[in-house]
Amino acid sequence: MKNRRLNPAVPPIERSGSIPRRCRDFVAFGPTVQSAWKNRAPEEQPLAAERSPEPQIVEIERPVYGGAFLARIEGKATFVPLVLPGERARVRIVEEKRGYSTAELEEIVAFERQRAAPACGHFGACGGCQYQHAQYAAQLEIKEAILRETLGRAGVHAPKTMTVLAGEPWGYRNRIRVAFDAEGNVGYRGRRSHRIGAIAECPIAAPLLAQAALHAGEIARNLPVRARPSELSLFCNAAQTELLASANVASDWALRDDDFSRMLAQRVPETKGAELAATDPKGSASRRIAMWGAESLFYRAAGFDYRVDQGAFFQVNRWLLNDLVDRVAAGRSGGLAWDLFAGVGLFARRLASEFARVVAVESAPAAIEALKENLHGTAGTAVKSKVLDFLRAARRKERPDLIVVDPPRTGLGAEITARLGEISAQELVYVSCDPATLARDLRALLSAGYAIDDIALADLFPQTFHLESVVRLRR
């Protein structure tokens, strides 16, 4: 791994605990991790029929996308969480499939030096993080190895040198989504189940978000059951001076529409707006039933103030936004650029200062009005359209000099990649949040005549398996 960039402007976050130099037994890590599998709730315990007769000692080979690590038992692939490559571990099989097994860790027999003491007391039981047991440098190596291996399996050869963009690995999240258990406690879903585990901390979240979540739990516990929300989304700006909240509630909400919002704002003065959304009985859709305060906040990033509305997509890492925008847009100029899957215009706004014209395409209702405002008075134009519909209509129009794509985890897909190949822009920048769909799409784009100029791993999600990358392609 080379060319790692750490953001020097980000102050370090103090956290308790230290990384043990020598670990004679698993107790060295305290109850944080070992209780995750020894003290699981009944619904998280494997069924008796699924348990192997005896634990087995395995050698951990390599990481696998999704947070687990590969071992082999009698030649069969076995996926184990909470371990590291090079370690020897005693594991118990909890699920058998035809092609692989899933195991739970019982004991580390031989430790790797890159193991770390988790910073969060919920790590191991909580489903939010997968890599807190690894030193941060090791996490970056794990993610680069996964990205290279995933691309290689698709026949896509990554450059020998891969730039890694990395910042402070704690307190980075500007958005979290929490749930409420039957008692009103706030928490996250468990690692091996949908059970909600109550939390007292969340070191990867901006401190304001963690505090707001805990205050929301205090409010919920003092409300009648029918008056409690089921889930709560929280989003703050980088400076933690403004916060938006969105609560999912039952259709027969038992409070006045603004009661929960006002109670939250009293405890968290940074709250600028809160919405209540009722989920339909089938749980497949929701509709806003009330709004209190502002519907948007302004987020300072990459030299601009972006309007971000309730529910609109915005990149989650408040330490790396500037570096990410630079990676996508810096040094690029010309006559026409397209920003597809534009969101609120994170990249389009920067491109509009370098290109004669920028067309930003977005279909999400939650983002389009903010996109229009963020591009107002610039060389950028917001187009409300699905990307595929836009490309179908744009085939015979002027060819752009640059196309930026930032799709969801499902990636671009066959028809979009085919049409991008036909349009044949001189340069294409692909921002991906899923290595498997990235590999699939890159294979198609390479077949259409593009070549990989550069790949950067942008670690927007430290402590988790999620992996963001920026690929620059040229014809």
Image: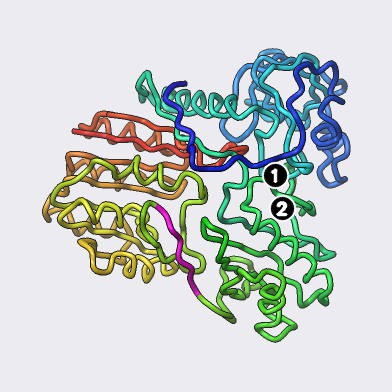
Q: Tell me if residue 100 is in the magenta stretch.
A: no
Point 60% across, 30% down: residue:
136
Instruction: Answer whether labels 1 and 2 touch (C-beta < 8 Å).
Output: yes
Q: Which mark is residue 453?
A: none
Q: Is residue 233 above or below residue 32?
A: below
Q: Quadrant of the C terminus?
A: top left
Q: Secondary structure at mark 1?
A: loop
Residue 88 position in % (x across, y down) = 74, 15
Residue 345 figure quarter: bottom left
Residue 430 position in % (x across, y down) = 34, 41
Amino acid type of the residue that numbered disc 2 sits on in the rendered structure: Tyr
Point 63% across, 50% down: residue:
205
Nearer-the-camera pick, 66 or 92 = 66
Nearer-the-camera pick, 73 or 271 = 271
Farthest residue in the bottom direction? 256
Residue 141 position in % (x across, y down) = 54, 24
Q: Which residues are magenta?
A: 295-301
Point 78% across, 71% down: residue:
219
- On the rendered structure, is 443 left or right of 128? left
* Magenta-colored segment: predominant secondary structure: strand
Residue 278 position in % (x across, y down) = 62, 75
Residue 272 figure quarter: bottom right
Residue 464 figure quarter: top right
Say which residue label 1 marks: 127
- On the rendered structure, is 223 left or right of 248? right
Q: How many marks?
A: 2
Q: Secondary structure at mark 2?
A: strand
Point 78% across, 16% down: residue:
22
Say which residue label 2 marks: 188
